[in-house]
Image (cartoon, rainbow, N blue to C red):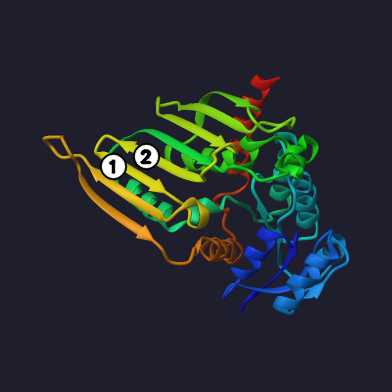
């Protein structure tokens, strides 16, 4: 039987979530501060429209809720949902800062509510394949990660909510950069040393448009990460280096280019490696896979992964880099 679910925030990401419910959830109710967006979603999926998030959370037909709003509302709405007894999938970064997220963690633990954080990139086909290769030990001991993630903004970008630190909590680092942090930590583990810069190089706004990070684990593994919204040609590149070879993940589909995974295996005599390349031209199924995992979190009463602790560790890195900016 499908679980009843509601959506708070009916913009682009809320729409993607609704498309991904498939066999796991039934969309019962939605709401948005823009009633037109809520009505459009409701008309498409045949669900009820709530006049407010409070009204939505009182709905007895839903066991879970997706929160897909701007950053300033994420933590407060998650707390409301938890206190209403609803399991939550909240979009990354989960909160604007560690203080907000700590409150969510404490209440979720006390009330035994499952909270999954929407670090969706983990569920792309290339990353699912890469994780299997790494976990099987085929790359050997991991040494380092090098990653770039960037887009070029758009006209008026500096006037959007992302450029307002009170609404966003920061700039490119907390927007796209947290994806790179989460993915790097997924493969390497917690980072014990954090260095880097969050800079504003092009856009006239009080938040960063570029973030350069150098992170190290206790074992000395390093992640070199660059997130940018001055990348005039959209790019996604994620390289994982092991003692026996390398994985290179490229593209996310759409404007980021064809999703692809290349596996370069080092030979005993070294020299040019053996190569295997997977391409994924098919429709992105990461949203459906992620929602399936959320449904299993609820049914199996298991701790979500990525969950609140993963979000906390990503924001911990963000906090350290932003403190260097001031």
**Residue 228 image offset from top left, x and y in percent:** 57, 36
Report which residue position mark 2 lands on. Answer: 240
Give me the residue at 48% from left, 66% from top: 283
Gap between marks 2 and 1, in whole Å?
9 Å
Q: Residue furthest front?
A: 155
Labels 2 and 1: the sequence-earlier one: 1
Query: Residue sitting at 74 percent across and 80 percent down?
Result: 46
Vertical comparison of 325 with 42: above or below: above
Q: Residues within 10 Å of mark 2 (few under 14, many from 20)?
A: many
Point out the residue furthest to the left here.
Answer: 269
Circle 1 residues within 10 Å: few <14, some 14–19, many ≥20: many
Residue 88 position, x and y percent, is 69, 58
Q: Secondary structure at mark 1?
A: loop
Disc 2 element: strand
Say which residue appears at 58% left-offset and 30% top-offset. Answer: 211
Residue at (71% x, 76% y) in the render: 44
**Residue 222 placement (x, y as % from top left):** 42, 28
Q: Quadrant of the N terminus?
A: bottom right
């Amino acid at each position: 039987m499908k679980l009843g679910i509601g959506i708070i925030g009916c913009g682009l990401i809320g729409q993607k979530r609704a498309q991904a419910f498939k066999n796991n959830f039934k969309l019962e109710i939605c709401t948005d501060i823009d009633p037109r967006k809520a009505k459009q979603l409701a008309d498409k999926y045949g669900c009820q429209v709530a006049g407010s998030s409070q009204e939505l959370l009182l709905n007895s037909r839903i066991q879970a809720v997706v929160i897909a709003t701007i950053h300033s509302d994420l933590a407060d709405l998650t707390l409301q949902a938890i206190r209403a007894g609803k399991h939550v999938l909240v979009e990354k970064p989960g909160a604007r800062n560690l203080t907000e997220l700590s409150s969510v963690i404490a209440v979720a633990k006390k009330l035994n509510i499952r909270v999954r954080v929407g670090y969706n990139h983990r569920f792309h086909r290339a990353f699912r394949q890469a994780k299997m290769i790494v976990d099987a030990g085929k790359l050997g001991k991991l040494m380092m990660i090098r990653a770039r993630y960037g887009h070029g903004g758009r006209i008026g970008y500096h006037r959007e909510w992302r450029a307002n630190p009170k609404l966003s909590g920061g700039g490119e680092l907390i927007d796209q950069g947290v994806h790179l942090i989460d993915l790097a930590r997924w493969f390497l583990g917690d980072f014990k040393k954090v260095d880097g810069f969050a800079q504003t190089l092009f856009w006239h706004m009080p938040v960063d448009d570029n973030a350069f990070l150098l992170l190290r684990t206790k074992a000395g593994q390093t992640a070199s990460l660059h997130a940018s919204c001055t990348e005039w040609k959209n790019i996604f590149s994620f390289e994982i280096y092991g003692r026996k070879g390398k994985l290179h993940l490229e593209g996310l589909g759409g404007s980021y280019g064809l999703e692809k995974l290349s596996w370069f295996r080092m030979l005993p005599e070294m020299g040019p490696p053996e190569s295997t390349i997977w391409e994924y031209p098919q429709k992105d199924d990461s949203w459906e896979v992620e929602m399936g995992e959320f449904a299993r979190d609820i049914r199996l009463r298991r701790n979500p992964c990525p969950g609140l602790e993963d979000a906390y560790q990503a924001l911990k890195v963000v906090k350290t880099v932003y403190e260097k900016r001031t």
